[in-house]
């Protein structure tokens, strides 16, 4: 027995499992002859190993079930991969659909510039001020000259108040309103039934000369356009008749002054 390599528990277990090389096996056998207690323990392990092998021998000798065969396992794996690919494709389509939806959302997001933005701003300000029964305007019709000077100075462009009596609207007054594109003037009118109409005016940084277009925004109708860098938007509650004739009158007066 080699003094340089003492017998360890691992050596004893390997002796039971019969995996030692011939030289080490002889060294362990010599050790067991000199240590009767260890020898009895190892003999018990060897007996248990033999009993288990005998009990499991019938199962070990059975043929491998077809479902556990190598070919079957490979084919099953291929089937799983084939099933995964459509799922991955569906996930990709969903992602692309989400991206497309976001792109479509961007396409239908209200414009941030131009006449489209002007129309939205006019509708928003109409909801705030035209519905105010007590103070819809800052300067009334009696001070129209003061109003014109004030808004013209703030807009840095001459602004005139349209006369819409021929269309059945009485001028109430006006005010300055704020927009993402700077200040704007809003002139308010009402008809014999008390229904209010607004004309909003502001300078345009883009679409400085744009033809008339009609808009509908949550119960409000509008007509908007731009002439020589000034944008105009008429807003009133939705009605059977179009606002276009009134808008044409405003445009006629604006162009006559210019």
Image (tube, rainbow, N blue to C red):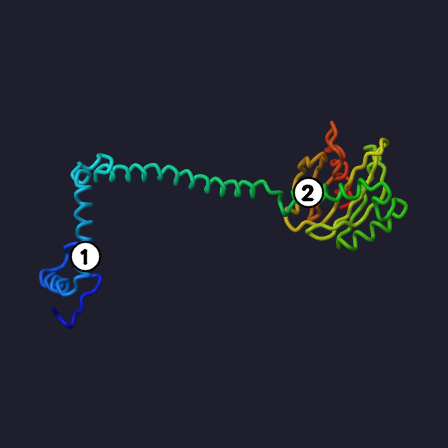
Q: Estimate the x, y position of residue 15 in percent, counting from the top left.
A: 16, 58
Residue at 53%, 43% (x, y): give it.
102
In this view, the residue farthest toward the right is 142
- Quarter where residue 87 is shown: top left
Q: Is residue 206 above or below residue 21?
A: above
User: Would you call the spot at circle 1 few (<14 residues within 10 Å), some (14-19), or many (20 or more)?
Assistant: some
Residue at 67%, 38% (x, y): give it.
212
Residue at 75%, 53% (x, y): give it.
155
Residue 89 disc label: none
Q: Estimate the x, y position of residue 217 in percent, counting from the top left.
A: 69, 37
Q: Estimate the x, y position of residue 91 in percent, counting from the top left.
A: 43, 40
Mark 1–mark 2 Cα distance, whole angstroms, equals 93 Å
Of badges 1 and 2, nearer the viewer stands: 1
| Secondary structure type for disc 1 | helix
Q: Earlier in the sequence, mark 1 or mark 2?
A: 1
42 on left or right of 196: left
Q: Estimate the x, y position of residue 49 in percent, counting from the top left.
A: 19, 49
Residue at 72%, 41% (x, y): give it.
123
- Quarter where residue 130 is shown: top right
Residue 42 disc label: 1
83 on left or right of 47: right
Q: Is residue 154 above or below residue 195?
A: below
Q: How many marks?
A: 2
Residue at which label 2 appears: 120
């Amino acid at each position: 027995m080699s003094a340089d390599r003492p017998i360890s528990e691992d050596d004893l277990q390997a002796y039971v499992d019969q995996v030692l090389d011939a030289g080490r096996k002889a060294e362990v056998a010599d050790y067991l002859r000199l240590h009767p207690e260890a020898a009895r323990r190892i003999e018990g392990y060897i007996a248990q190993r033999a009993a288990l092998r005998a009990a499991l021998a019938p199962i070990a000798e059975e043929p491998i079930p077809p479902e556990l065969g190598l070919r079957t396992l490979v084919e099953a794996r291929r089937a799983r991969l084939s099933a995964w690919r459509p799922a991955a494709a569906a996930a990709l389509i969903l992602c692309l659909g989400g991206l497309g939806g976001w792109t479509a959302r961007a396409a239908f997001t209200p414009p941030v510039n131009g006449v489209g933005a002007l129309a939205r701003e006019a509708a928003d300000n109409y909801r705030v001020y035209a519905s105010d029964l007590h103070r819809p305007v800052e300067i009334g019709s009696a001070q129209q000259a003061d109003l014109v000077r004030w808004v013209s100075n703030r807009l840095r462009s001459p602004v005139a108040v349209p006369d819409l009596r021929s269309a059945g609207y009485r001028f109430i007054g006006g005010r300055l309103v704020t927009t993402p594109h700077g200040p704007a003037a809003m002139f308010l009118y009402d008809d014999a039934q008390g229904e209010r109409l607004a004309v909003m005016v502001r300078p345009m940084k883009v679409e400085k000369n744009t033809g008339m277009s009609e808009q509908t925004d949550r119960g409000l109708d509008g007509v908007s356009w731009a002439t020589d860098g000034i944008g105009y938007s008429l807003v009133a509650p939705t009605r059977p008749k179009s606002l276009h004739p009134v808008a044409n009158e405003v445009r006629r007066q604006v162009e006559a002054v210019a």
